[in-house]
Amino acid sequence: MAEVTVYTTSTCPWCTRLKDFLRAEGISFHEVDVGKDPAAAKRMVELTGQRSVPVTTIGEQIIIGYDPDGIKELLG
Amino acid sequence: MTGELYDLIIIGAGPAGMTAAVYCLRKGLRTLILSKDIGGQANWTTLVENYMGFLEISGPELMQRFEEQLKKEKATVVIDEAVNLEAQAGVFAVTGKTTGAHRARAVIVASGKRPKKLGVKGEEEFKGKGVSYCSTCDAPLFREAVVAVAGGGNSGVQAVLDLLANEARQIYLISDEELTADQVLAEKIIDHPKVRLYQHSLVSEIHSEQMIAAVSVQSRKTGLVERLPVEGIFVEIGLEPNSDFLQALRKNDLGEVVIDCECRTSLPGVFAAGDVTNIPEKQIIVACGEGAKAAIKAWAYLTQK
Protein backbone atom coordinates (compact mmCIF):
# COMPACT_ATOMS: atom_id res chain seq x y z
CA MET A 1 0.00 0.00 0.00
CA ALA A 2 1.22 3.53 -0.77
CA GLU A 3 2.53 5.47 2.22
CA VAL A 4 -0.06 7.74 3.83
CA THR A 5 1.12 11.03 5.35
CA VAL A 6 -1.20 13.47 7.11
CA TYR A 7 -0.12 17.08 7.62
CA THR A 8 -1.82 18.56 10.68
CA THR A 9 -1.78 21.23 13.34
CA SER A 10 -2.56 20.34 16.94
CA THR A 11 -5.45 22.81 17.14
CA CYS A 12 -7.19 21.74 13.92
CA PRO A 13 -10.54 19.99 14.58
CA TRP A 14 -10.73 18.51 11.07
CA CYS A 15 -7.25 17.02 11.50
CA THR A 16 -8.46 15.21 14.63
CA ARG A 17 -11.48 13.84 12.79
CA LEU A 18 -9.33 12.75 9.87
CA LYS A 19 -6.92 10.86 12.13
CA ASP A 20 -9.87 9.23 13.93
CA PHE A 21 -11.23 8.13 10.55
CA LEU A 22 -7.91 6.62 9.48
CA ARG A 23 -7.54 4.75 12.77
CA ALA A 24 -11.13 3.47 12.57
CA GLU A 25 -10.46 2.19 9.04
CA GLY A 26 -7.22 0.55 10.13
CA ILE A 27 -5.17 2.72 7.75
CA SER A 28 -1.67 3.29 9.11
CA PHE A 29 -0.31 6.76 8.54
CA HIS A 30 2.57 9.06 9.34
CA GLU A 31 1.61 12.40 10.93
CA VAL A 32 3.52 15.64 10.41
CA ASP A 33 2.52 18.47 12.77
CA VAL A 34 3.40 21.48 10.64
CA GLY A 35 2.46 23.83 13.47
CA LYS A 36 5.42 22.59 15.49
CA ASP A 37 7.85 22.20 12.63
CA PRO A 38 8.29 25.30 10.40
CA ALA A 39 10.60 23.43 8.01
CA ALA A 40 7.95 20.74 7.52
CA ALA A 41 5.35 23.48 6.98
CA LYS A 42 7.49 24.93 4.21
CA ARG A 43 7.91 21.47 2.63
CA MET A 44 4.15 20.91 2.77
CA VAL A 45 3.46 24.21 1.00
CA GLU A 46 6.05 23.43 -1.69
CA LEU A 47 4.78 19.88 -2.15
CA THR A 48 1.04 20.53 -2.15
CA GLY A 49 0.60 24.21 -2.95
CA GLN A 50 -1.59 24.37 0.17
CA ARG A 51 -1.30 26.62 3.19
CA SER A 52 -4.12 24.94 5.01
CA VAL A 53 -4.57 21.69 6.92
CA PRO A 54 -5.38 18.85 6.90
CA VAL A 55 -3.56 17.68 3.79
CA THR A 56 -3.08 13.97 3.11
CA THR A 57 -0.59 12.49 0.69
CA ILE A 58 -1.02 8.92 -0.53
CA GLY A 59 2.09 8.12 -2.51
CA GLU A 60 2.18 10.88 -5.12
CA GLN A 61 -1.50 11.75 -4.75
CA ILE A 62 -2.67 14.72 -2.67
CA ILE A 63 -5.98 15.06 -0.87
CA ILE A 64 -7.01 18.45 0.44
CA GLY A 65 -9.10 18.85 3.58
CA TYR A 66 -11.23 16.27 5.38
CA ASP A 67 -12.23 13.92 2.59
CA PRO A 68 -12.77 10.33 3.79
CA ASP A 69 -14.40 9.29 0.49
CA GLY A 70 -11.43 10.59 -1.49
CA ILE A 71 -9.03 8.64 0.72
CA LYS A 72 -11.07 5.44 0.41
CA GLU A 73 -11.23 5.84 -3.35
CA LEU A 74 -7.47 6.27 -3.69
CA LEU A 75 -6.72 3.34 -1.41
CA GLY A 76 -9.23 1.16 -3.24
CA MET B 1 -35.78 7.50 -5.06
CA THR B 2 -35.07 4.99 -2.29
CA GLY B 3 -37.92 2.69 -1.39
CA GLU B 4 -38.22 3.04 2.36
CA LEU B 5 -40.64 5.55 3.78
CA TYR B 6 -39.23 6.85 7.07
CA ASP B 7 -41.25 8.46 9.81
CA LEU B 8 -38.77 11.29 9.93
CA ILE B 9 -35.75 12.70 8.12
CA ILE B 10 -33.41 14.95 10.07
CA ILE B 11 -31.29 17.20 7.87
CA GLY B 12 -28.01 17.98 9.62
CA ALA B 13 -25.99 16.28 12.35
CA GLY B 14 -24.73 19.13 14.48
CA PRO B 15 -25.86 19.60 18.10
CA ALA B 16 -29.51 20.26 17.12
CA GLY B 17 -29.76 17.41 14.60
CA MET B 18 -28.05 14.80 16.77
CA THR B 19 -30.11 15.70 19.84
CA ALA B 20 -33.32 15.54 17.78
CA ALA B 21 -32.23 12.15 16.43
CA VAL B 22 -31.64 10.65 19.88
CA TYR B 23 -35.07 11.83 21.04
CA CYS B 24 -36.82 10.50 17.91
CA LEU B 25 -35.06 7.13 18.03
CA ARG B 26 -35.90 6.68 21.70
CA LYS B 27 -39.54 7.30 20.80
CA GLY B 28 -39.34 4.51 18.26
CA LEU B 29 -39.59 6.68 15.15
CA ARG B 30 -37.96 5.26 12.01
CA THR B 31 -35.46 8.06 11.51
CA LEU B 32 -32.95 8.87 8.79
CA ILE B 33 -30.24 11.48 9.37
CA LEU B 34 -28.99 13.13 6.20
CA SER B 35 -25.97 15.33 6.78
CA LYS B 36 -22.83 16.44 4.98
CA ASP B 37 -20.82 15.89 8.17
CA ILE B 38 -21.08 14.96 11.82
CA GLY B 39 -20.72 17.77 14.32
CA GLY B 40 -21.34 20.80 12.10
CA GLN B 41 -20.09 24.16 13.27
CA ALA B 42 -19.30 22.85 16.76
CA ASN B 43 -16.29 21.14 15.15
CA TRP B 44 -14.69 24.54 14.59
CA THR B 45 -14.77 25.51 18.25
CA THR B 46 -11.48 25.14 20.05
CA LEU B 47 -12.81 25.20 23.58
CA VAL B 48 -16.32 24.98 25.00
CA GLU B 49 -16.66 26.13 28.61
CA ASN B 50 -20.42 26.70 28.85
CA TYR B 51 -21.89 23.33 27.99
CA MET B 52 -23.19 21.96 31.26
CA GLY B 53 -21.54 18.83 32.59
CA PHE B 54 -18.12 19.66 31.14
CA LEU B 55 -15.85 22.21 32.80
CA GLU B 56 -14.09 22.47 29.47
CA ILE B 57 -14.10 20.33 26.35
CA SER B 58 -13.09 20.91 22.73
CA GLY B 59 -15.87 21.24 20.16
CA PRO B 60 -14.77 18.13 18.19
CA GLU B 61 -14.53 16.05 21.37
CA LEU B 62 -18.01 17.13 22.46
CA MET B 63 -19.35 16.18 19.04
CA GLN B 64 -17.65 12.78 19.29
CA ARG B 65 -19.55 12.21 22.55
CA PHE B 66 -22.77 13.15 20.75
CA GLU B 67 -21.92 10.75 17.94
CA GLU B 68 -21.33 7.91 20.43
CA GLN B 69 -24.81 8.54 21.83
CA LEU B 70 -26.22 8.49 18.31
CA LYS B 71 -24.52 5.15 17.63
CA LYS B 72 -25.91 3.71 20.86
CA GLU B 73 -29.41 4.39 19.51
CA LYS B 74 -28.44 2.65 16.24
CA ALA B 75 -29.15 5.70 14.10
CA THR B 76 -29.25 5.43 10.31
CA VAL B 77 -26.92 8.14 9.01
CA VAL B 78 -26.37 9.03 5.36
CA ILE B 79 -23.43 11.37 4.79
CA ASP B 80 -24.61 13.59 1.96
CA GLU B 81 -25.66 17.20 1.45
CA ALA B 82 -29.38 17.93 1.18
CA VAL B 83 -30.10 19.91 -1.98
CA ASN B 84 -33.90 19.90 -2.09
CA LEU B 85 -36.96 19.49 0.12
CA GLU B 86 -40.47 19.20 -1.25
CA ALA B 87 -43.87 17.82 -0.36
CA GLN B 88 -44.95 15.03 -2.71
CA ALA B 89 -48.33 13.29 -2.46
CA GLY B 90 -48.64 13.66 1.29
CA VAL B 91 -45.03 12.81 2.14
CA PHE B 92 -41.78 14.76 2.02
CA ALA B 93 -38.91 14.08 -0.36
CA VAL B 94 -35.45 15.23 0.70
CA THR B 95 -32.88 14.97 -2.07
CA GLY B 96 -29.22 14.28 -1.29
CA LYS B 97 -26.60 15.56 -3.71
CA THR B 98 -25.22 12.09 -4.43
CA THR B 99 -27.75 9.71 -2.87
CA GLY B 100 -30.93 11.01 -4.52
CA ALA B 101 -34.35 11.32 -2.91
CA HIS B 102 -35.29 9.99 0.54
CA ARG B 103 -38.91 10.01 1.74
CA ALA B 104 -40.48 10.59 5.13
CA ARG B 105 -43.75 11.60 6.77
CA ALA B 106 -42.10 14.51 8.59
CA VAL B 107 -38.82 16.44 8.50
CA ILE B 108 -36.63 18.30 10.98
CA VAL B 109 -34.29 20.81 9.37
CA ALA B 110 -31.11 21.34 11.42
CA SER B 111 -28.65 22.23 8.68
CA GLY B 112 -26.81 24.94 10.60
CA LYS B 113 -24.70 27.74 9.18
CA ARG B 114 -21.51 28.16 7.19
CA PRO B 115 -18.83 30.88 7.07
CA LYS B 116 -19.71 33.87 4.94
CA LYS B 117 -17.42 34.65 2.05
CA LEU B 118 -16.04 38.03 1.03
CA GLY B 119 -17.15 37.58 -2.58
CA VAL B 120 -14.11 39.35 -3.99
CA LYS B 121 -11.76 38.49 -6.82
CA GLY B 122 -9.14 35.92 -5.83
CA GLU B 123 -11.05 34.45 -2.88
CA GLU B 124 -12.27 31.17 -4.45
CA GLU B 125 -9.15 30.63 -6.49
CA PHE B 126 -6.82 30.87 -3.50
CA LYS B 127 -8.90 29.12 -0.87
CA GLY B 128 -6.43 26.94 1.02
CA LYS B 129 -3.53 28.73 -0.66
CA GLY B 130 -3.56 31.67 1.71
CA VAL B 131 -7.31 32.26 2.06
CA SER B 132 -8.51 30.54 5.23
CA TYR B 133 -11.78 30.37 7.13
CA CYS B 134 -10.30 28.52 10.13
CA SER B 135 -7.72 30.34 12.22
CA THR B 136 -7.80 27.52 14.75
CA CYS B 137 -6.58 25.18 11.99
CA ASP B 138 -4.26 27.31 9.92
CA ALA B 139 -2.78 30.07 12.13
CA PRO B 140 0.30 27.91 12.92
CA LEU B 141 1.16 27.97 9.20
CA PHE B 142 1.67 31.74 9.27
CA ARG B 143 4.53 32.05 11.73
CA GLU B 144 6.66 35.13 10.88
CA ALA B 145 4.17 36.06 8.14
CA VAL B 146 2.32 39.28 7.42
CA VAL B 147 -1.37 38.42 7.40
CA ALA B 148 -4.74 40.13 7.00
CA VAL B 149 -7.88 39.30 8.97
CA ALA B 150 -11.27 40.40 7.64
CA GLY B 151 -13.93 40.87 10.30
CA GLY B 152 -14.14 43.00 13.42
CA GLY B 153 -16.39 40.78 15.53
CA ASN B 154 -15.39 38.20 18.12
CA SER B 155 -14.30 35.67 15.47
CA GLY B 156 -12.09 38.21 13.72
CA VAL B 157 -10.39 39.30 16.93
CA GLN B 158 -10.00 35.67 17.98
CA ALA B 159 -8.25 35.00 14.64
CA VAL B 160 -5.86 37.88 15.42
CA LEU B 161 -5.18 36.38 18.84
CA ASP B 162 -4.59 32.94 17.27
CA LEU B 163 -2.10 34.52 14.85
CA LEU B 164 -0.33 36.43 17.64
CA ALA B 165 -0.06 33.22 19.65
CA ASN B 166 1.59 31.65 16.62
CA GLU B 167 4.07 34.51 16.22
CA ALA B 168 2.80 36.12 13.02
CA ARG B 169 4.98 39.12 12.16
CA GLN B 170 2.25 41.69 11.44
CA ILE B 171 -1.53 41.54 11.28
CA TYR B 172 -3.89 43.91 9.48
CA LEU B 173 -7.39 43.70 10.96
CA ILE B 174 -9.97 44.98 8.50
CA SER B 175 -13.45 45.75 9.78
CA ASP B 176 -16.28 47.21 7.73
CA GLU B 177 -17.37 49.29 10.73
CA GLU B 178 -16.10 49.93 14.27
CA LEU B 179 -14.91 46.78 16.02
CA THR B 180 -17.93 44.93 17.37
CA ALA B 181 -15.98 42.33 19.34
CA ASP B 182 -16.54 42.04 23.09
CA GLN B 183 -14.48 44.64 24.92
CA VAL B 184 -12.54 42.01 26.85
CA LEU B 185 -11.27 40.59 23.54
CA ALA B 186 -10.80 43.88 21.67
CA GLU B 187 -8.64 45.31 24.47
CA LYS B 188 -6.12 42.54 23.91
CA ILE B 189 -5.31 43.67 20.36
CA ILE B 190 -6.16 47.36 19.93
CA ASP B 191 -2.80 48.73 21.04
CA HIS B 192 -0.76 45.67 20.19
CA PRO B 193 2.41 46.68 18.28
CA LYS B 194 1.94 43.89 15.71
CA VAL B 195 -1.68 44.80 14.90
CA ARG B 196 -2.82 47.58 12.59
CA LEU B 197 -6.53 48.36 12.46
CA TYR B 198 -8.45 49.34 9.34
CA GLN B 199 -11.94 50.26 10.53
CA HIS B 200 -14.76 51.29 8.17
CA SER B 201 -12.89 49.45 5.44
CA LEU B 202 -13.52 46.57 3.06
CA VAL B 203 -11.29 44.03 1.38
CA SER B 204 -11.87 44.75 -2.30
CA GLU B 205 -9.49 42.28 -3.95
CA ILE B 206 -7.06 39.47 -3.18
CA HIS B 207 -3.98 39.66 -5.39
CA SER B 208 -1.93 36.60 -6.11
CA GLU B 209 0.53 34.82 -8.26
CA GLN B 210 1.02 31.18 -7.18
CA MET B 211 0.08 32.08 -3.61
CA ILE B 212 -1.44 35.21 -2.11
CA ALA B 213 0.70 38.32 -2.52
CA ALA B 214 -1.48 41.20 -1.32
CA VAL B 215 -4.96 42.42 -0.48
CA SER B 216 -6.55 45.69 -1.49
CA VAL B 217 -8.38 47.51 1.27
CA GLN B 218 -10.83 50.27 0.49
CA SER B 219 -11.90 52.87 3.04
CA ARG B 220 -15.67 53.21 3.19
CA LYS B 221 -15.24 56.82 4.30
CA THR B 222 -12.77 58.16 1.74
CA GLY B 223 -12.97 55.54 -1.02
CA LEU B 224 -9.17 55.35 -1.05
CA VAL B 225 -7.65 51.96 -1.84
CA GLU B 226 -4.47 50.72 -0.19
CA ARG B 227 -2.60 47.63 -1.33
CA LEU B 228 -1.19 45.64 1.59
CA PRO B 229 1.41 42.93 0.89
CA VAL B 230 0.35 39.82 2.82
CA GLU B 231 0.90 36.06 2.67
CA GLY B 232 -2.58 35.16 3.78
CA ILE B 233 -6.01 36.36 4.76
CA PHE B 234 -8.35 34.92 7.38
CA VAL B 235 -12.01 35.57 6.60
CA GLU B 236 -14.10 35.89 9.75
CA ILE B 237 -17.08 38.00 8.70
CA GLY B 238 -19.83 35.93 10.21
CA LEU B 239 -22.02 33.04 9.19
CA GLU B 240 -24.93 32.45 6.84
CA PRO B 241 -27.59 29.74 7.09
CA ASN B 242 -27.50 26.56 5.03
CA SER B 243 -31.00 27.23 3.77
CA ASP B 244 -30.58 27.80 0.01
CA PHE B 245 -32.29 24.48 -0.74
CA LEU B 246 -35.31 25.25 1.44
CA GLN B 247 -37.38 27.06 -1.17
CA ALA B 248 -40.56 25.59 0.29
CA LEU B 249 -40.12 27.29 3.68
CA ARG B 250 -40.63 30.85 4.87
CA LYS B 251 -37.33 32.56 5.71
CA ASN B 252 -36.37 35.93 7.19
CA ASP B 253 -34.14 38.59 5.60
CA LEU B 254 -31.04 36.74 6.81
CA GLY B 255 -32.18 33.53 5.10
CA GLU B 256 -32.95 31.86 8.42
CA VAL B 257 -35.92 29.48 8.56
CA VAL B 258 -38.75 31.11 10.49
CA ILE B 259 -40.15 28.89 13.25
CA ASP B 260 -42.70 29.32 16.03
CA CYS B 261 -42.26 28.39 19.68
CA GLU B 262 -42.99 24.74 18.82
CA CYS B 263 -40.26 24.61 16.14
CA ARG B 264 -42.90 24.51 13.37
CA THR B 265 -41.98 26.01 10.00
CA SER B 266 -44.41 27.48 7.49
CA LEU B 267 -44.90 23.98 6.00
CA PRO B 268 -46.93 21.64 8.25
CA GLY B 269 -44.92 18.50 9.00
CA VAL B 270 -41.58 20.27 8.62
CA PHE B 271 -39.89 21.40 11.83
CA ALA B 272 -36.56 23.19 12.28
CA ALA B 273 -34.01 23.67 15.05
CA GLY B 274 -30.64 25.20 15.78
CA ASP B 275 -28.61 27.87 14.01
CA VAL B 276 -30.43 27.57 10.67
CA THR B 277 -33.53 29.04 12.35
CA ASN B 278 -34.46 32.58 13.39
CA ILE B 279 -33.87 31.73 17.08
CA PRO B 280 -31.36 34.48 17.95
CA GLU B 281 -29.27 32.59 20.52
CA LYS B 282 -26.67 30.70 18.48
CA GLN B 283 -25.30 28.46 21.22
CA ILE B 284 -24.60 24.72 21.35
CA ILE B 285 -26.73 24.27 24.43
CA VAL B 286 -29.64 26.21 22.93
CA ALA B 287 -29.41 24.21 19.68
CA CYS B 288 -29.62 20.99 21.70
CA GLY B 289 -32.70 22.23 23.52
CA GLU B 290 -34.32 23.27 20.26
CA GLY B 291 -33.45 19.90 18.71
CA ALA B 292 -35.15 18.10 21.59
CA LYS B 293 -38.19 20.37 21.27
CA ALA B 294 -38.45 19.81 17.52
CA ALA B 295 -38.25 16.04 18.04
CA ILE B 296 -41.03 16.01 20.63
CA LYS B 297 -43.22 18.20 18.44
CA ALA B 298 -42.51 16.08 15.36
CA TRP B 299 -43.39 12.94 17.32
CA ALA B 300 -46.67 14.57 18.45
CA TYR B 301 -47.41 15.57 14.84
CA LEU B 302 -46.81 12.03 13.60
CA THR B 303 -48.79 10.29 16.32
CA GLN B 304 -51.75 12.68 16.13
CA LYS B 305 -51.85 12.80 12.34
Image (cartoon, coloured by chain):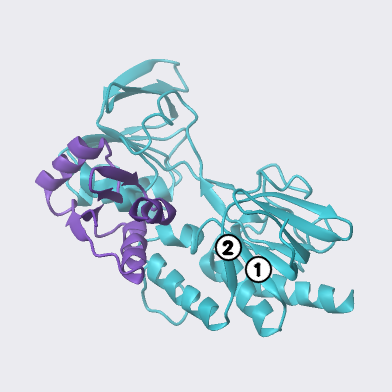
Chain colours: A purple, B cyan
Tell me if B103 is positioned left or right of B208 in this view.
right
Q: Is residue B89 visible?
A: yes
- Measure how far apart labels 2 and 1 are at the Cα level: 7 Å
**Residue type indicated by callout 2:** Val
Question: Residue at image x 71%, y 55%?
Answer: B94
Question: Residue at image x 66%, y 59%?
Answer: B279
Quarter of the figure with residue B13? bottom right
Q: Which residue is mark 1?
A: B32
Crowding near the residue tagged with mark 1, few <14, some 14–19, many ≥20 C-alpha atoms within 10 Å: many
Question: Residue at image x 17%, y 46%?
Answer: B167
Q: Secondary structure at mark 2?
A: strand
User: Which of these two is toward me, A63 or B174?
Assistant: A63
Up the image or down, A50 lies above or below B55; here it is above
Up the image or down, A37 lies above or below B20; here it is above
User: Which of these two is toward me, B105 or A23?
Assistant: A23
**Residue type indicated by callout 1:** Leu
Residue B78: mark in rendering:
2
User: Which of these two is toward me, B87 or B195?
Assistant: B87
- Determine contact: label 2, label 1, CB under 8 Å: yes
Residue A34: mark in rendering:
none
Quarter of the figure with residue B36? bottom right
Tell me if B98 is positioned left or right of B199 in this view.
right
Instruction: Determine if marks 2 and 1 fall on one subunit.
Output: yes
Q: Earlier in the sequence, mark 2 or mark 1?
A: 1
